[in-house]
Image (spheres, rainbow, N blue to C red):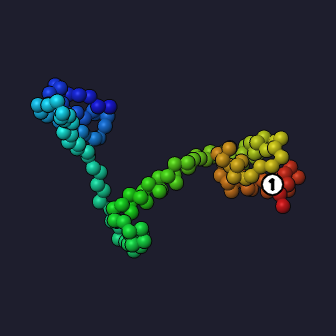
Amino acid sequence: MWRWSSPPSRQKLSRDTSSNKEFSIKFYSVPQSKNLFILPYTTLYMQRYIYPVDLTEVEDELNIIVEKLKTSKAEAIREAIRHYAEELRGLEVVELRDVPKEQAKEEVKEFIKGKERVWADEIADALRLDLSLVNDILMELWSEGYVEPED
């Protein structure tokens, strides 16, 4: 959110406390003639974020990227960050619950009741249980004849 802080003759856009960017817009008054339209002179200041990063471990890979893409190292790093962020955008983090095995077994039975087909990871995600625990429970339920694995 930006707000004007100076009179209209020379306006300066000041920084709002909720933002990290500063902009300055300056307007200069110039006599206008009939055939001349003058646009205001604008100066734009933006805060830059610079992070010192040790790239010794990935220097060879970075050089390969720069050589193949014909770009600068800085641009290659920015593009890698964008790519990684895009990859993580749809990622969902499931926090597992710590429940006793018998309670988990009952929850699994209840979850698969009425379903014709269900995957172990689907059960684990829905019930927020560890996948290995779900697999153990499914093996027990199979030995009891409650479920059957698909061929």
Among the 4 quarters of the image, the one containing residue 150: bottom right
Task: Count numbered badges in the picture.
Answer: 1
Could you tell me residue 52's position as x and y percent? 29, 60
Residue linked to disc 1: 140
Decide: is 27 above or below 89: above
Point 38% across, 68% down: residue: 70
Quarter of the picture holding the C terminus: bottom right
Q: Which amino acid, mark 1?
A: Glu
Could you tell me residue 5's position as x and y percent? 20, 28
Point 36% across, 66% down: residue: 71
Mark yes or no: residue 68 visible. Answer: yes
Residue 8 versus residue 95: which sits nearer the camera? 8
Could you tell me residue 3's position as x and y percent? 26, 28
Decide: is 92 above or below 36: below
Decide: is 111 above or below 132: above
> Which residue is at the far left?
31
Point 20% across, 42% down: residue: 43
**Is 50 left, or right, of 38 in this rendering?**
right
Mark yes or no: residue 57 visible. Answer: no
Point 68% across, 44% down: residue: 126
Quarter of the picture holding the N terminus: top left
